[in-house]
Each structure stands twice: as structure tokens, then as C-alpha cells.
Image (tube, helix red, strand yellow):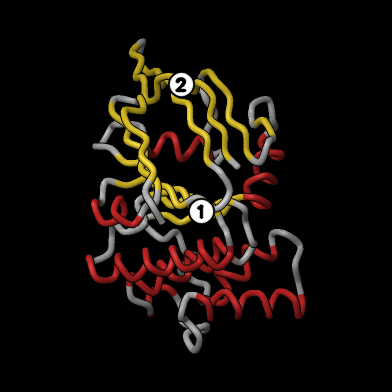
């Protein structure tokens, strides 16, 4: 589903180069539940941004569902993100003036879904994350855990092949974080969606069925666990 081949990422400013990633290679199969972990500055968020087509590598290549990412226009990358990728962020990234229903349905509207299909899919996604009855509430009227559930519903309503979650438990207490991880694991099993996390949270690492460790922009360990 994801193939990262010898990818490096370098940032330059005032004649200074920062090597965020150094020759990273990684293959992620369909339906995996994988965490990329490491200390701050290890390159994990950079790697997630590259896989998510939010940034481009300095060298190397990334393939999403067999398609090379390099050389694509911004419009083509935006289309790929809309159709194949879902995103969950630590800050939730919900639109504050929209209700839970509207935040989730907006993702479908961008794909041209409308009418009865849009309503049915939106309500089903909110039901799956345990938010039935809260559809009309705006983010400011929801707890942090509920907001993250809206974000998960928004990511999954498009039926993406891959969900990328950047530190999804960082702004949640431990009990709520565990609930969110249990929800994601259940959705991974029921939908077969590939989940890739970036994290430094030990609880996320424990939940992952595969753990990739980064240090100074390079992979230092890649461990698979029994389901």
C-alpha cells in the first residue's frame, strides 16, 4: 500500500542544511496498524508528511498504492490525498463554525458526494465512532476525545485506503487516549484500512502491531508483533 524507497529530506535556511530523513526505506502492506516512533527531531512527522503528499522528498521515491508521487502537480497530489488518504491530527483540525455532521460531510462534498448518499455515509461514520445524537454540536461544545472522534469519522467517511495519524493522543488524557486507540484498532479490523501513526506515546507503541523506530532521520528498528 505504501512504499518508501531510499527517501531523504533536507531543509535549508541561511546556508544551513538540516537532514530530517536519511535514506529511509519502508514497505507498508494493506491493513497494517503501524506506529513510527522516536524522540523529537527524529523525523517521524516529516516521514508522515511525505507519505501524506503534504511535502516532497529531497531524494528517493514514495509510492501510494503502486503510484509514484514524485513529479505530480499540486492539483494531482490534492486529488490523491482526497481519494486515497485520511488524516487525523493531534490538534483535531476541525472547522470551529461547523457542526460535527458538517465537519464530516464536508470531506464527502469535496469528492462530489451529495444528497441522500452524503447524509447516509456521514451519519454512519458518526455512529461508528460513537457520536450518534451529537451531530449538531460544534467542536467547542465537545470534549477533546469527542473532537478526535469527529476527526476520525471525517478521515474514514471517504473510505480511504490509508489513514495517517500524527500524534493522535497528544492532547488527550490517558483514559481518553486509550479509548481513541481502541476505536481505531476496531475500525482497522472492521474496514481493513491501513493505519500509520507518528508518536512518542508509549501507549500508541503498545497498541501498534508493527513498530518502526527512527533516530536522527534513519530507521533503527522495525519490529512486527503478533495480532
Q: Report helix, strand or loop for mark 1.
A: strand
Q: Quadrant of the C terminus?
A: bottom left
Q: What x and y, as percent, mark residue 214?
A: 32, 32
Q: What x and y, as percent, mark residue 191?
A: 58, 64
**Left or right: where 179 falls relative to 47:** left
Tell me where residue 37 sits by quadrant: top left
**Left or right: where 138 falls relative to 124:** left
Name the residue at 71% across, 39% down.
76
Q: What x and y, as percent, mark residue 144?
A: 33, 70
Q: What x and y, as percent, mark residue 189?
A: 51, 64
Are the two marked residues, 2 and 1, in contact with CB atoms closer than 8 angstroms?
no
**Badge 2 or badge 1: first in the primary sequence:** 2
Q: For mark 1, what is the residue?
A: 87
Q: Which numbered circle lies on residue 8?
A: 2
Name the residue at 23% across, 66% down.
173
Looking at the image, the residue that sits furthest to the top is 15
**Left or right: where 213 falls relative to 158:** left
**Left or right: where 135 falls relative to 34:** right
Amino acid at each position: 500500500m505504501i512504499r518508501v524507497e531510499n527517501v531523504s529530506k533536507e531543509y535549508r535556511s541561511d546556508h544551513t542544511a538540516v537532514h530530517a530523513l536519511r535514506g529511509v526505506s519502508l514497505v507498508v502492506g494493506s491493513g497494517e496498524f503501524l506506529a513510527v516512533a522516536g524522540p523529537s527531531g527524529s523525523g517521524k512527522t516529516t516521514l508522515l508528511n511525505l507519505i501524506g503528499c503534504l511535502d516532497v522528498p529531497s531524494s528517493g521515491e514514495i509510492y501510494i498504492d503502486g503510484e509514484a508521487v514524485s513529479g505530480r502537480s499540486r492539483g494531482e497530489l490534492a486529488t490523491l490525498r482526497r481519494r486515497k488518504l485520511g488524516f487525523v491530527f493531534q490538534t483535531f483540525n476541525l472547522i470551529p463554525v461547523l457542526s460535527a455532521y458538517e465537519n464530516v460531510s464536508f470531506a464527502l462534498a469535496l469528492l462530489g458526494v451529495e444528497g441522500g448518499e452524503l447524509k447516509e455515509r456521514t451519519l454512519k461514520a458518526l455512529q461508528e465512532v460513537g457520536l450518534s445524537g451529537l451531530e449538531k454540536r460544534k467542536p467547542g461544545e465537545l470534549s477533546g476525545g469527542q473532537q478526535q472522534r469527529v476527526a476520525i469519522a471525517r478521515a474514514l467517511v471517504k473510505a480511504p485506503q490509508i489513514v495517517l495519524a500524527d500524534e493522535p493522543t497528544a492532547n488527550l488524557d490517558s483514559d481518553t487516549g486509550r479509548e481513541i486507540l481502541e476505536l481505531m484498532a476496531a475500525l482497522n479490523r472492521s474496514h481493513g484500512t491501513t493505519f500509520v501513526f507518528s508518536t512518542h506515546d508509549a501507549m500508541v507503541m503498545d497498541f501498534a502491531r508493527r513498530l518502526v523506530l527512527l533516530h536522527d532521520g534513519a530507521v533503527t528498528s522495525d519490529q512486527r508483533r503478533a495480532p
